[in-house]
Image (cartoon, rainbow, N blue to C red):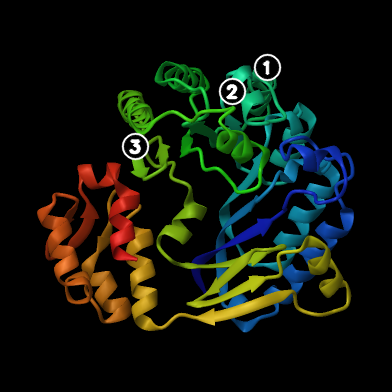
Amino acid sequence: MSANAGIYVHIPFCRSKCAYCAFVSLPCRRPPAAYLAALLTQARQLAALPWSRERIFTTLFIGGGTPTIYPAAMLTELLAGLRSSFNLAPAPEITIESNPNTLDLALLQSLRRAGVNRLSIGVQSFSDRLLRTVGRGHSRRDALQALAWAGQAGFTNLNLDLIYGLPGQTPAQFAADLARALEFAPAHLALYQLTLEEETPLARAVAAGSLTQPDEDLVAEMELTARATLQEAGYEHYEVANYCRPGRQCRHNLHYWHNGSYLGLGAGAVSCLSGLRISNVRSPGRYQRLLAAGQVPYAEAEALGRPASFRETVVMGLRLRRGLKIAELQQRFALTPQEYYGTILEELVQAGLLEVDSRRIALSERGFALANQVLNRLV
């Protein structure tokens, strides 16, 4: 067996007519038990594949929405079912995502007993004003309480999500968020620039001019503040949006950044089986109905050709600070970046955005700060 794959379980936001849909971060009072049953049905389908039986899975990541809207007993049953279906490594990384207002000490203690050893909390900000602005359902107090409970429950591998570039946010406010996060000594921090989703109340408010996002210079100042603050605190900026204490990278996400293999369970989830990409239907209701009827929940499948797979591997791998080994690319695809990109690569090197030698290709320090622009040239 080869230990080179992960499992991703997608628990989307509830789409029923409840308060949870009005502001997606509010806890749902009626999370559907049938959805978790469907997840376990698909788990058994995928586990029966020869491809799956040949692998030991090193990571399990439960996320996508807010899995912790479900009670502890149901999540424990889900975890037990996944463990019995797949060959998990002796010490797998098992992550669950959460929002602060869906956590309590008893739930966290139950998750630890069930084997969850990595907790990701979507704090986003410690400012009540900013949280209200973007429609989050939790408060600063909720976030602080959730973090305290996480420590009491024994979670030492803790990730915090923070967002910068929020409407009305200043560099000083973002610096204050970072300082407060560091008080809890998280193993990992994910820092995301705000992205407006079309047809959301926040996007409409910005379009109407009732809310204003910080300009590019202020956003750049926030990014510089984060890099300086976290470097001084001993964190490694190992991926474009991710920082960690030495040795505490998110092992599951490394599967994605290395363009590796993983199984995707749940509505809208994607599996990548040695290059074959299979997407599940996006509707949770249809996903449940298909599985209840004994059918597979697939929407489409795609097998990327060698050049497209090479290009995707380069773009994903360059998000990592250490970049990619050229020998590994050549062994995997019989291609090198120099051969494939030609003058585009030369231009990026001359502009000081890429560093390339006979062994490795990586973003330069300047290129890392402009990663999205550089990677767009290589897509």
Q: Amino acid at mark 1?
A: Arg
- The front one of 348 and 248 is 348
* Residue denoted by label 2: 130
Label 3 neighbour load within 10 Å: few <14, some 14-19, many 20+: many
9 vs 187, left or right, is right
104 vs 222, left or right, is right
- Residue 39 percent location from the top left of the image: 77, 63
Whether residue 275 is visible to the viewer of this picture, yes or no, is yes
Say which label, 1 or 3, has the lower sequence index. Answer: 1
Label 2 neighbour load within 10 Å: few <14, some 14-19, many 20+: some
Whether residue 320 is visible to the viewer of this picture, yes or no, is no
- Residue 165 percent location from the top left of the image: 46, 31
Quarter where residue 342 is shown:
bottom left
Label 1 neighbour load within 10 Å: few <14, some 14-19, many 20+: some
Q: Amino acid at mark 2?
A: Leu
Say which label, 2 or 1, has the lower sequence index. Answer: 2
* Residue denoted by label 3: 236
Q: CA distance from mark 3 to mark 2?
A: 27 Å
Q: Nearer the viewer, mark 1 or mark 3?
A: 1
